[in-house]
Image: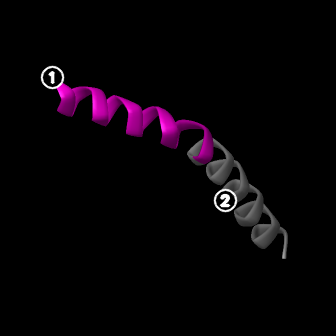
Amino acid sequence: MRALVRIVSWLYVVAIFGFIFLPVVVLVLFSLQAT
C-alpha cells in the first residue's frame, strides 16, 4: 500500500514538471524549425 502511494506521488510530480516543461519544449522545437 505504501508503495502505491509512493508511485502515485511520483507520477503526480512528473505530471507537474511535464506541464511546466512541455510548452518550453514546444517553443524550442518551433524555434529550431523556423531557422
Q: Which mark is residue 18?
A: none
The x and y percentages for residue 12 are: 72, 56
The span from disc 1 to disc 2 (Cα, nearest Å) is 35 Å
Tell me the chief SS of the magenta region. helix
Q: Position of residue 35 (x, y in %)?
A: 15, 23
Element type where label 2 sits in the image: helix
Which residue extends farthest bottom? 1
Please provide percent x and percent y for residue 30. 29, 34
Q: Amino acid at mark 1?
A: Thr
Q: Which residues are magenta?
A: 19-35
- State which mark lies toward you, 1 or 2: 1
Q: Which residue is mark 1?
A: 35
Name the quadrant of the N terminus.
Answer: bottom right
Residue found 68% across the figure and 47% down from its top: 16
SS class, disc 1 = loop
Q: Residue at x 20, y 28 (%)?
A: 34
On the picture, is 30 further left or further right than 10? left
Say above or below: 26 vs 31.
below
Viewer-side residue, 9 vs 16: 16
In the drawing, what numbered circle is on residue 11?
2
Return the residue found at the far top: 35
Tally of marks: 2
